[in-house]
Image (cartoon, grey):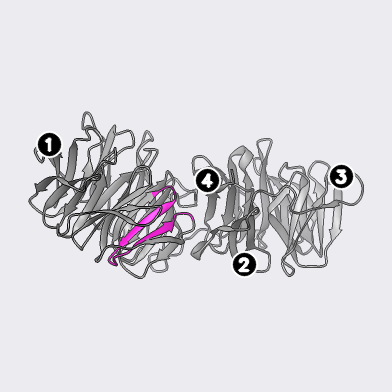
């Protein structure tokens, strides 16, 4: 997940280009089914974006699909005039419904997965028995059917769309009031609210009273569809090339993210988690978005260059035990991010930022005090951010890396061919190690008085414990204390390379930062969270708890 702003811009963690126009998406348990103008259905891994399977059987484009509630089945509708039921495990066709029902625009499962409903270009809604393949009911509408769904309030009722009208039907084909204006309807997970798209307005209403809970507007294009997040706190909608996300659970419902990047109309939009969104577009791509624009303030965009005015992030620090991450930028702005809410909790400005040209620093929250260290003019300056004053200066010629230990007891920095450690309490040196290779501090960095060093040229790692008595630190096996998932590559003081995660037991790669996020200025990693800072001024926070070995 990527965490960020209250009312800003969304960020795309990675993009998958399929070479054909993408028309439909469905999500279940980190699998994304993708339908396109090509007849095959592609299954993608929602974490990496990699292709995991291809389902072949349709003879024309696939324009709608959805997983069953248990993820074992997938139903799809195609331009070949058929609806197909797939076994996701084997990739085979279980049953084909219809043989010439026109181009199928919409499909859905009933809650008990015993029936499938479909909507077609020929104005027909069909209800199919999954066991027998029989058409239980056929309903003729006034125009093509662009949406179909079972009512969560009554499994014997269907909701369909014809042009800009939403119709209610019973499963025998009888119309049920009320008829309402709209292009799409979506119900909250607990069914107490529904969201309705009507032209450029999205309304969230109470299911029982129909009272309006919130109302939002989009610009430029009509809102085609809208969805609730799995926790019911957010509503997303797509209009033209842009997706929007609103917070409807707060006392003051408001926009929390704007997702810009597609060059064609968004054709499908789904939540993959309470903080993740996936979109498909006519530009032949599927984009994986993280909700929250990664800066604490709304990010102004230059329409000509599409570059943000944020200052480059120079350091990030992860304190997962405290539920926070800390970032600092080249202008000396330090921000504390709350891992659970996606928002920043506090912002500090270091007064001497104009002199901080090297961009080497670190920050830690120690006993509720934000301590910030930054190297400039050959010295490390230690700031108490709360008081806004320097509490110590240490000589550090040719400083190439700087970290405050995880417990706040030790300052560790790379300087002039060696690694040095200083006590944060006495300001006395506690150890020094001479180095013969080009090093940088490992993203795992420091745990108490232990530090991991990664060597650029040999691609090796070493570790030292500076918390022992005596003049010299003790070397330890760098694999000791490392998490079951290992961070590889990433930033160094000299070059930038892609960052990826592997399972240390199997050696298998399970995630790689791609595209825009393949190279960062600084990274922290503790085995669950990865925090990265970028030259663009963005901060990326990924949570790998769902892939940790059990």
In the visual, does 303 lie left or right of 193? right
Taking the magenta stretch, the answer to whether it contains residue 521 is no
In the visual, does 450 lie left or right of 320? right
Mark 2 and mark 4: span between their CA atoms? 28 Å
Residue placed under numbered mark 4 in the picture? 546
- Which badge, 2 or 1, comes first in the chain's sequence? 1
- Which badge, 2 or 3, comes first in the chain's sequence? 3
Mark 3 and mark 4: span between their CA atoms? 36 Å
Q: Main secondary structure of the magenta part?
A: strand
Q: Quadrant of the C terminus?
A: top right
* Disc 3 to disc 4: CB gap under 8 Å: no
Q: Please provide percent x and percent y for residue 271.
A: 38, 48
Number of callouts in the render?
Answer: 4
In the visual, does 259 lie left or right of 512? left
Q: Report the mark closest to the observer, 1 or 4.
A: 4
Indicate the quadrant where residue 54 lies. Answer: bottom left
Mark 1 and mark 3: span between their CA atoms? 76 Å
Q: Please provide percent x and percent y for residue 289.
A: 42, 54
- Residue at the limit of the structure toward the front, as seen here: 132
* Disc 1 to disc 4: CB gap under 8 Å: no
- Which badge, 1 or 3, comes first in the chain's sequence? 1
Mark 1 and mark 4: span between their CA atoms? 42 Å
Task: Rate crowding at label 2 as few (under 14), some (14 to 19) or many (20 or more) other CA atoms within 10 Å.
Answer: some
Residue placed under numbered mark 2 in the picture? 496
Mark 2 secondary-structure assignment: strand
Provide the residue span drawn in magenta.
28-47
Residue placed under numbered mark 3 in the picture? 468
Residue placed under numbered mark 1 in the picture? 178
Mark 2 and mark 3: span between their CA atoms? 34 Å
- Which badge, 1 or 4, comes first in the chain's sequence? 1
* Disc 1 to disc 3: CB gap under 8 Å: no
């Amino acid at each position: 997940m990527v965490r960020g702003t209250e009312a800003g811009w969304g960020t795309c963690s990675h993009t998958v280009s399929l070479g054909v126009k993408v028309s439909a998406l469905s999500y279940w348990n980190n699998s994304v089914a993708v339908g396109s103008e090509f007849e095959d259905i592609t299954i993608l891994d929602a974490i990496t974006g990699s292709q995991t399977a291809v389902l072949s059987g349709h003879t024309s484009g696939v324009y709608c699909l959805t997983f069953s509630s248990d993820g074992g089945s997938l139903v799809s509708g195609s331009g070949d005039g058929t609806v197909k039921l797939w076994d996701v495990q084997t990739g085979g066709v279980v049953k084909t419904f219809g043989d010439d029902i026109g181009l199928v625009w919409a499909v859905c499962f009933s809650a008990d997965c015993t029936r499938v409903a479909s909507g077609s270009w020929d104005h027909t809604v069909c209800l199919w028995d999954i066991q027998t393949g029989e058409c239980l009911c056929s309903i003729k509408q006034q125009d093509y059917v662009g949406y179909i769904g079972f009512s969560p309030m009554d499994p014997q009722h269907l909701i369909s769309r014809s042009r800009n009208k939403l119709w209610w039907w019973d499963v025998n084909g009888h119309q049920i009031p009320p008829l309402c204006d709209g292009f799409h309807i979506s119900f909250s997970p607990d069914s107490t609210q529904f969201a309705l798209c009507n032209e450029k307005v999205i309304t969230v209403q109470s299911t029982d009273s129909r009272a309006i809970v919130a109302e939002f507007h989009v610009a430029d294009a009509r809102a085609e569809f809208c969805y609730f997040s799995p926790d019911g706190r957010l509503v997303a909608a797509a209009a033209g090339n842009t997706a929007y996300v609103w917070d409807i659970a707060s006392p003051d419902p408001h926009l929390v993210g704007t997702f810009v990047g597609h060059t064609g109309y968004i054709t499908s939009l789904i939540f993959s988690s309470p903080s993740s969104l996936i979109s498909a577009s006519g530009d032949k791509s599927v984009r994986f978005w993280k909700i929250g624009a990664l800066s604490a303030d709304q990010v102004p965009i230059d329409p000509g260059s599409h570059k943000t005015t944020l200052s480059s992030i120079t350091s990030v620090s992860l304190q997962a035990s405290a539920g926070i991450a800390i970032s600092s930028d080249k202008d000396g702005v330090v921000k504390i991010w709350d891992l659970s809410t996606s928002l920043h909790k506090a912002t500090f400005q270091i007064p001497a930022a104009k002199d901080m040209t090297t961009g080497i620093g670190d920050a830690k929250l120690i006993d509720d005090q934000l301590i910030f260290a930054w190297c400039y003019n050959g010295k490390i300056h230690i700031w108490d951010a709360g008081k806004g004053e320097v509490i110590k200066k240490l000589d550090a010629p040719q400083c190439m890396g700087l970290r405050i230990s995880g417990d706040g007891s030790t300052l560790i920095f790379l300087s002039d061919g060696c690694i040095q450690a200083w006590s944060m309490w006495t300001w006395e040196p506690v150890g020094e190690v001479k180095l013969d290779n080009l090093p940088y501090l490992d993203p795992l960095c420091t745990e108490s008085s232990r530090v991991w060093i990664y060597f650029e040229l040999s691609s090796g790692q070493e570790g030292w414990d500076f918390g022992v008595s005596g003049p010299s630190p003790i070397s330890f096996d760098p694999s000791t204390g490392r998490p079951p998932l290992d961070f590889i590559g990433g930033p160094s003081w000299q070059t930038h390379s892609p960052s990826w995660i592997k399972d240390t037991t199997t050696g298998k790669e399970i995630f790689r930062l791609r595209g825009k996020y393949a190279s960062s200025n600084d990274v922290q990693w503790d085995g669950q969270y990865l925090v990265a800072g970028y030259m663009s001024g963005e901060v990326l926070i990924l949570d790998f708890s769902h892939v940790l070995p059990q």
